[in-house]
Amino acid sequence: MNLAIFDLDNTLLDGDSDYNWAQFLISKGLVDKKTHNASNKQFYDDYNDGKLDIYEFCEFQFKFFKDNPRDFTDKILKHYVTEIAEPMITRDARSLVEKHKQNGDKLLIITATNSYITKPIANLLGIKNHIGTDLEEINGEFTGKAKGIPSFREGKIERLNLWLNEKNLPFDDFEKTFFYSDSQNDIPLLQIVSNPVAVNPDEILQKEAIKNKWPIMILK
């Protein structure tokens, strides 16, 4: 059996679900436009530049969840997924996922974006195995803190290993391991799979892919 791992933002999606979530909240008047927009853009730029402080970002993004009741955020999330996230799924991405399904591969999405936002998107793609940065909860309400290891950079490898251990699936037992990603931040995980694929790569990842003779794929 093969393992096919997918990044989500700018890989299976035409855009970034994290960034667009914040812009969605702004458009609905649910957060202060001036301060939220500036912070959102700065964090997004930091991510693209490979210098994001994931814990600072989590504190910024999770504040909305902490400040609002869970039933309210659940309603907002449903609107976001329907109005914004679902149209971001590209035709080519659906075809790629379907190809791996038809091959009988085990599929997994692993994303730095929080699992609360991205799990419903994974469901739309028909991928039941999903790892995202988890939110801490107490009595069903979000605390505004991250739970466990954020699935970012080397943290993706740590979270992948935890997931494999939970499923009793030794990494070396897979015949092939694929990982599809657009970002320089995912180079650590790309380096350990047997079949790394750069998808819509940023400049640094593109150079790394060319240097290592990794396939480069454009999904749209």
Image (cartoon, rainbow, N blue to C red):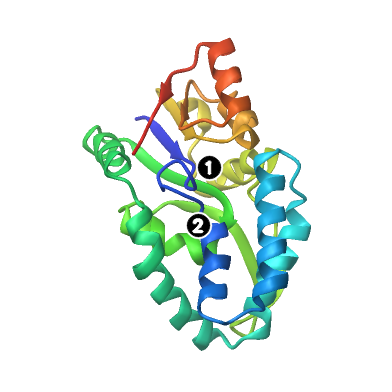
Left or right of residue 155, residue 113 in this image: left
Q: Position of residue 8 (x, y in %)?
A: 47, 47
Left or right of residue 169, residue 137 in this image: right
Whether 180 is drawn above or below 85: the answer is above
Q: Is residue 122 visible?
A: yes
Q: Which mark is residue 64?
A: none
Label 1 environment density (alpha carbons within 10 Å; few <14, some 14–19, many ≥20): few
Identify the residue at horizontal 66%, vertical 61% (top origin): 40
Identify the residue at horizontal 52%, vertical 46% (top origin): 110
What's the residue type where badge 1 is placed? Leu
Label 2 environment density (alpha carbons within 10 Å; few <14, some 14–19, many ≥20): many
Which residue is at the front of the view, 34 or 99? 34
Which residue is at the front of the view, 126 or 37? 37
Q: Quadrant of the C terminus?
A: top left
The nearer-to-camera label among 2 and 1 is 2
Q: Which residue is mark 2?
A: 17
What's the residue type where badge 2 is placed? Ser
Whether 144 is drawn above or below 14: the answer is below
Q: Position of residue 44 (x, y in %)?
A: 65, 51
Q: At numbered mark 1, what does the secondary structure look like: helix, strand or loop?
A: helix
> How far apart are the alpha carbons under marks 2 and 1?
25 Å
Q: Position of residue 5 (x, y in %)?
A: 45, 38
Q: Which residue is mark 1?
A: 164
Q: At numbered mark 2, what does the secondary structure look like: helix, strand or loop?
A: helix
Identify the residue at horizontal 47%, vertical 79% (top origin): 76
Q: Is residue 149 visible?
A: no
Whether 1 is drawn above or below 136: the answer is above
Identify the residue at horizontal 56%, vertical 55% (top origin): 132
Left or right of residue 165, residue 80 in this image: left
- Mark found first going from the N terminus, 2 or 1: 2
